[in-house]
Amino acid sequence: FQAEDGIRDFCLSRGLGDVYKRQGHYQERLRSFADHPLVGEVRGEGLIGATELVKNKATKEAFAPAENVGGIISDYCLKHGLILRPVGDAMCFCPPLIITDSEIDSLFDRYSKALDEGLDHLTKEGKAVA
């Protein structure tokens, strides 16, 4: 029994077939951040996901907690109308189950802009290796 089978069965048994259909697009867009210089790891299942922010992608060196990088990126997200929950330096995504494909695209387009601006900010301050 695999987790994906369980998610599919849960969604379909509760009339949430659209959720199951959208999760592939959602995960594809989420996983596209694996190549971003600030992202050391991308993880997710269904419509839940996170990106782990790192100081140095090549070495996976973490930011010092005092640098509050999750908070900095969260502020850039807010600037673009996106509310994400930073847990340390992991940016957590948990959209509503009624999210559409176009809203998924908007969510991740906004996150991309925020992440790029955050990278510029952190690089200028010498906190990130781009």
Image (cartoon, grey):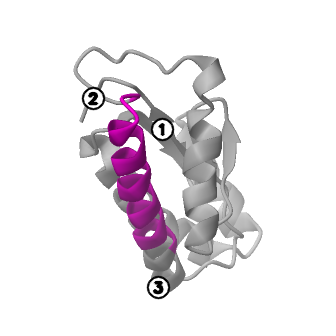
The residue wearing badge 3 is 102
Callout 2 environment at 10 Å: few (<14), some (14 to 19), or many (20+)? some
Q: Residue at x 70, y 57 (%)?
A: 10
Q: Is residue 117 magenta?
A: yes
- Label disc, if present, on residue 129 of the rendered structure: 2
**Residue 56 location in percent, x, y?**
31, 23
For mark 2, give the secondary structure.
Answer: loop
Going from N to C along the chain, the mark reached first, 3 or 1, is 1
The amino acid on which the numbered mark 2 sits, given as a three-letter code, is: Val
Q: Nearer the viewer, residue 117 or 31?
A: 117
Residue 96 against residue 67 in the figure, above or below: below
The residue wearing badge 1 is 43
For mark 1, give the secondary structure.
Answer: strand
Judge depth for marks 2 and 3 and give the one in front. 2
Q: Nearer the viewer, residue 64 or 109?
A: 64
User: Distance of mark 2 from mark 3, alpha carbons?
Assistant: 33 Å
